[in-house]
Image (cartoon, rainbow, N blue to C red):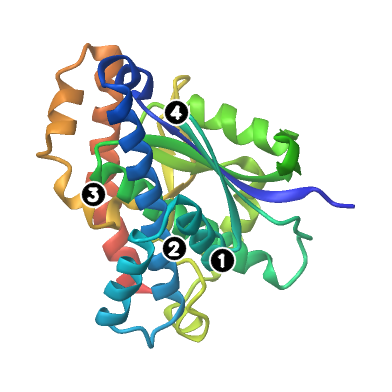
Amino acid sequence: MSYERLIAYFDILGFKNLVLSETLESMVGRFGQIYTTIGAAAVRHEAEQQDILSVGAIAERYEQIEAADLGGIRAAFEEATGMTLLLMSDSLVMYSHPLVHDRDDWFRQLSTLLRVSRTVIDKLLEYELPARGALGFGELYVDAANGIYVGKGLVEVYELAESQEWIGVVAAPSLTNDLSEMHKGFTMERWRQGKWLARADWDYLPYDVPFKTGPQRMYAVNWATTPNARHLQGSNLFRRGLAEPPQVAVKSTNTLAFLNQASRDGFQGIASR
């Protein structure tokens, strides 16, 4: 039996400081914000897959999910994306069912992972919850009933996320060849024929990702083209980040550099294909 899955791991930055500085009730509310983020990701993904959804229908769907309890939000997300959600303190994990790489649903599920990750980063920032993360494909054994999650795939995305020096999401080496194939073969005509397809440069792009050991050219989720990214430069979150000591402020500096480059390149890239 194959245990290979697509996996996304997000580490919410500064969460320990929030735990130490905020009341327990406030921190419980933070998890409500995280679940609201998950609900928004579900709705946005549904809308991207179905052109027939009107603005009114999307708003109604948002209201339905916001009115649900946490279990209902989780169920809506998992039904919309085909991915399972795991929330552990300051870590958010999403994983697919076991996948065979050469099956028809492979690139569809990879596109889902990219687009949902883009929304998650965007919506977390709406609540001033910056995160860094990684996407990968590898072994992950899951026994949810007994709380057992183990595999090389989970180790890969965890270590990759923890080694970055910015707010953002990078694709692990286990996905490089597939993303290169998707990126090179992308056209707007192909996207119009299959709305499920992640858009090259708009949803993901090659970038010199800042790591603690120095920049590495890899594919990154392009959240620079999301709604909240456009308001971040003058936000309190970034003002506070840039005012930190240099070893801390570097994350904000690197993030602003990404936003300035990726939003420009992203808009140009999508228009030219």
Residue 209 in sight in this render:
yes
Q: Quadrant of residue 227?
A: bottom left
Q: Which residue is identified by label 1?
A: 79
Which mark is first along the chain, 4 or 2? 2
> Who's the residue at 72% across and 73% down the image?
104
**Residue 42: assigned label:** 2
3 and 1 marks in contact (CB < 8 Å): no
Q: Position of residue 191 (x, y in %)?
A: 47, 78
Q: Nearer the viewer, mark 2 or mark 3?
A: 2
Q: Which residue is identified by label 4?
A: 164
Which mark is first along the chain, 3 or 2? 2
Spatial CA distance of label 4 from label 1 is 31 Å
> Who's the residue at 46% across and 77% down the image?
49
Horizontally, residue 63 falls left or right of residue 39, namely: left
Q: Position of residue 88 (x, y in %)?
A: 53, 32
Q: Quadrant of residue 192?
A: bottom left
Residue situated in front as seen by the camera: 236 or 209: 236
Label 4 sits on a secondary structure element that is loop
Label 3 sits on a secondary structure element that is helix
**Residue 229: assigned label:** 3
The three-letter amino acid code for the residue at tag 2 is Ala
Residue situated in front as seen by the camera: 107 or 187: 107
2 and 1 marks in contact (CB < 8 Å): yes
Spatial CA distance of label 3 from label 1 is 27 Å
Q: Position of residue 149 (x, y in %)?
A: 71, 35
The three-letter amino acid code for the residue at tag 3 is Ala
Q: How many marks?
A: 4
> Who's the residue at 30% across and 84% down the image?
54
